[in-house]
Image (spheres, grey):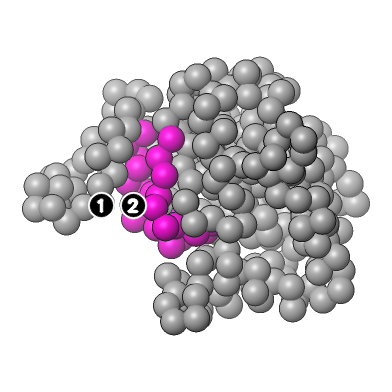
């Protein structure tokens, strides 16, 4: 594999690391599968099979003219799972835009083969502000994303990624090199996919999909997320999913899989049922670990 051909003939670039229970990682907009590398490596080393792929239109995948709606994206996920033989005992984890693919897969494909899910700084259940969803983001702000990209694509993403990673005037949780990497990865994506996917995650209502998420679900969100506000998404998603565990990262920005990488990786492994190593246990006893155990995460299966 490193490529899977979807039902409509699009080539998707797939990274498949390790052996064991499959964990499929869905990246955020406008990045690619490499944004999951820290977690994928940890998962593979802990005895899981980490599968991450570049969404159509992004990274090393094909750039077809269409198919950037969530029904098609959920079908792409189903095609990757089938091609990889990962349709049994799988956990699907979506970051930001990727959370929508998790929700739509569960409703459109009946959650086939899935035993657990993760919504990480996710757009689920609804990003848009409406009369019955006042917590959302006003439509003109969301439309401003497309307008800014059309006007000056590369200029738009420079301040976007500073907000994404919580970069301030004085301090930054990421290096300049990380900001440069994000800009370079975004440059791999096609303009049409960038615009169409921005429209999809901004205006798709996933509230009807929530009842289909019937598996244990880890919801992680930063309280300082200015890109996907927690009140409109993470907190409401946790309320709408019966078997959910909400973990809020106080003061964390949107890109927490990178800014809070160690903590998030450990939380994810704990949720998956990974037993700490001797070294990890010693660190816990010495008080050197983050308080992720204090969140009282419950593993979805007894052991990795």
Taking 32 as reference, is 16 above or below it? above
168 or 81, which is in the foreground?
168
Left or right of 142 on screen, residue 115: left
Graded by Cα atoms within 10 Å as few (under 14), some (14 to 19) or many (20 or more), the crowding at tag 2 reads some
Compared to residue 277, the image places residue 114 above or below, namely above
Relative depth, front residue between 148 and 192: 148
Q: Residues within 10 Å of mark 1 (few under 14, many from 20)?
A: some
Span shown in magenta: 246-271
Give the vertical position of 201 relative to 252 (above or below). above
Badge 2 marks a residue whose secondary structure is helix
- 96 left or right of 215? right
| Quarter in which the C terminus is drawn | top left
Could you say where residue 32 lies in the image, as x and y percent from the top left? 63, 57
Instruction: Give the labeled residue for mark 1.
Output: 290
Kindly identify the residue that appears in the image at 65 percent across and 74 percent down.
159
- Residue placed at 59% from the left, 50% from the top? 229
Q: Is residue 112 above or below residue 159?
A: above
Pick the residue in front: 28 or 136: 136
Residue occupied by mark 2? 263
Measured in 3D between alpha carbons, the distance from the residue under mark 2 to the one under mark 1, in whole angstroms, is: 6 Å
* Residue under the point 67% across and 55% down: 29
Residue 83 in sight in this render: no
Please tell me whether residue 148 belongs to the stretch shown in magenta.
no
Nearer to me, 189 or 253: 253
Residue 243: x percent and y percent? 46, 21
How many numbered markers are drawn? 2
On residue 148, the disc is none
Classify the position of the N terminus by image quarter.
top right
State if disc 1 and disc 2 touch (CB < 8 Å). yes
């Amino acid at each position: 594999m490193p490529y899977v051909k979807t039902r409509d003939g699009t080539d998707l670039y797939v990274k498949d690391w390790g052996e064991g229970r499959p964990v499929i990682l869905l990246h955020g907009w406008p990045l690619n599968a490499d944004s999951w590398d820290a977690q994928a490596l940890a998962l593979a080393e802990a005895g899981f099979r980490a599968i991450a792929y570049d969404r159509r239109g992004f990274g090393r995948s094909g750039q077809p003219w269409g198919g950037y709606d969530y029904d098609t994206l959920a079908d792409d996920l189903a095609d990757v799972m089938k091609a990889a033989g990962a349709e049994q005992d799988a956990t699907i984890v979506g970051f930001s835009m990727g959370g929508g693919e998790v929700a739509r897969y569960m409703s459109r494909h009946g959650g086939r083969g899935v035993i657990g899910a993760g919504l990480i700084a996710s757009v689920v259940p609804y990003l848009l502000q409406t009369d019955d969803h006042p917590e959302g983001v006003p439509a003109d702000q969301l439309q401003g994303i497309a307008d800014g990209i059309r006007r000056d694509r590369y200029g738009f993403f420079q301040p976007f990624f500073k907000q994404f990673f919580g970069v301030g005037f004085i301090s930054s949780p990421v290096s300049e090199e990380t900001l440069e990497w994000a800009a370079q990865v975004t440059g791999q994506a096609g303009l049409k996919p960038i615009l169409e996917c921005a429209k999809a995650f901004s205006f798709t209502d996933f509230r009807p999909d929530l009842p289909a998420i019937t598996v244990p679900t880890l919801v992680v969100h930063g309280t300082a997320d200015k890109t996907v506000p927690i009140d409109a998404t993470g907190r409401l998603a946790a309320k709408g999913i019966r078997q959910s565990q909400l973990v809020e990262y106080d003061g964390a920005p949107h890109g927490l899989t990178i800014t809070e990488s160690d903590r998030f990786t450990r939380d994810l492994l704990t949720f998956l049922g990974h037993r700490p190593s001797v070294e990890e246990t010693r660190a816990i006893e010495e008080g050197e670990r983050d308080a992720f155990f204090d969140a009282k995460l419950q593993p979805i299966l007894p052991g990795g």
